[in-house]
Amino acid sequence: MNYSVVKGTSYVLVHTPDMIIHNGTTQTTEKHLNPNSEYLKAIPNHIRTFEEAVNYMPNQVYIGNHKPAELKTIEQPWYDKDVADAKRDGKFGEIMPQDEFLGLIKIVDVFDLVLLSKEFTAEVKPKLEAHPLIKDEFVAKLKEGHDIADIEKFVNEQDAEGLYFDKKLIGCVKRAHDVDANLNAHVILENLVAKASGVLAAWHLLAKNDLQPEEVEYVIECSEEACGDMNQRGGGNFAKSIAEMAGLTNATGSDLRGFCAAPAHALISAASLVQAGTFKKVMVVSGGSTAKLGMNGKDHIKKGMPILEDVVGGFAVIIAENDGVNPVLRTDLVGRHTVGTGSSPQAVITSLVTAPLDKAGLKITDIDKYSVEMQNPDVTKPAGAGDVPTANYKMIAALGVKRGEIERTGIDAFIQNHGMEGWAPTQGHIPSGAPYVGFAREAMLAGEINRTMIVGKGSLFLGRMTNLFDGASIVMEKNTGKLDAGKGVSEEEVRGLVAEAMRDFASHLLQD
């Protein structure tokens, strides 16, 4: 069977310290309920600089400068241990500073809702002009900027959302409608951040994988945001808006939502579309979330830590026709948390892990690496959520013991050999399976591993429409190099078959 292949990936982070205070849901809620709280007063003393965020090992792993296995060699916590060779630019993408990202938000705004001050515009424009992926025509969209007095008036009198840099107001996002709550300034900013980080990921995907924009025929966007108005709340379409900015002139697309599980659903959908021949190349892309900035900030500050949820994340993957080289996505080995699965840990792992493996007669140990919820334990452990990836690996191992595929004494060895330390920011969907796809592709091309399983999970009950849990998984496998010659016949072969059939028919007529 000619499965689709993972032809390239990209991963980006954006350091957004001021957005923690002004846009993260934990902080905005605190401002509303307790504006004079000690927590809000303490935040400025627990904010990392851009350099500190770049020098953070999990962030360096996310953009591809270090491998996940290296995290095992560093004692936790990691936030107080700098990386000697840390770089802003990575093999898979980059860590962008906040000022440049604010300029990018203005660039991707097509309705002139974003205003930046003249002073800030003059400072950031040269930086964006120097960025290798941002074209001059995009930088020109910044224009000259606006008077800060006008920006202050929009914030104070017309419910605009302020934009801050170095604790100073430098711009705003205007509301897009006077009464529509779906188009208020806060929502517009959330959506522009998701779009801008998604565009940045798309640009890196094209540049780092020698892809021509016109090759992409379909885009699936799988973040946790939703754009629309009062008549079609969440109608979309982030995918097409990102495709527009990325120059994907031959592409259409749509948004796919599934809470944290969305990236796994998107990979399955993209692989199926390409394998079916509907499209030759499909981009899966996702921007990040301002709402989750500083989500566990209170617990971090209580323990004297910096607020580690200070980055917006993004990623992109290109799925293409089988080339006999790149790793394949086994669409016949898909795990599904169905309506009837239930929510017990055993039921969840059975549906997502062992059910698809049983289809191919594979054991749990036949998967070299499991990419589950790869959340960074530096972030989650101080908040009382524990080490999320390790908890997942323990559940998989326990099921392996029950199936007789792992010795009870071999659980720790299984976690060591088939698991990984988490490194992804807690941006909801971002950690869910997707962060390892780029590393898995490289490892399979190098002959280091044969199979990985990408596992996504989602908390559908958060939407208050169902109490159901959700999840999906797919096996990614080293390409055998053998293509299915029986996939179809060429146009020339069809003409030959028709001509042969006509000759046979004529011969029968003459015999009659």
Image (cartoon, rainbow, N blue to C red):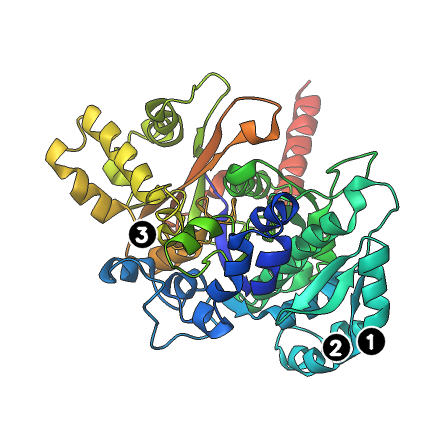
Q: Seen from this angle, which residue lies furthest left?
A: 409
Query: How packed is label 1: few (under 14 Cα within 10 Å), some, or many (20 or more)?
Result: few
- Compute the Cα span from label 3 to label 2: 40 Å
Identify the mark nearer the N-term, 1 or 3. Answer: 1
Q: Do the residues labelled 2 and 1 touch (CB within 8 Å)?
A: yes
Residue situated in front as seen by the camera: 429 or 285: 429
Q: Name the residue under label 1.
A: 143
Q: Residue sitting at 84 percent across and 74 percent down?
A: 147
Question: What residue did someone put label 3 on?
Answer: 421
Residue 179 is situated, as x and y percent measured from the top left of the image, at 87, 41
Q: In this view, does 151 lie above or below 403?
A: below
Q: Nearer the viewer, mark 2 or mark 1?
A: 2
Residue 247 visible from this viewpoint = no
Gap in Å between the C-alphas at discs 1 and 3? 45 Å
Near-viewer residue (130 or 115)? 115
Residue under the point 39% across and 57% down? 439
- Residue 54 seen by the camera: yes
What kind of residue is marked 1?
Lys
On the rendered structure, is 332 left or right of 253? left
Reading the image, the residue beneath label 2 is: 121
Residue 392, located in which quarter of the rendered image? top left
> Closer to the camera: disc 3 or disc 2?
2
Mark earlier in primary sequence (2, 1) = 2
Q: 93 or 309: nearer the eye?
A: 309
Q: Earlier in the sequence, mark 3 or mark 2?
A: 2
Q: Is mark 3 on a helix, strand or loop?
A: loop
Q: Position of residue 291 (x, y in %)?
A: 60, 48
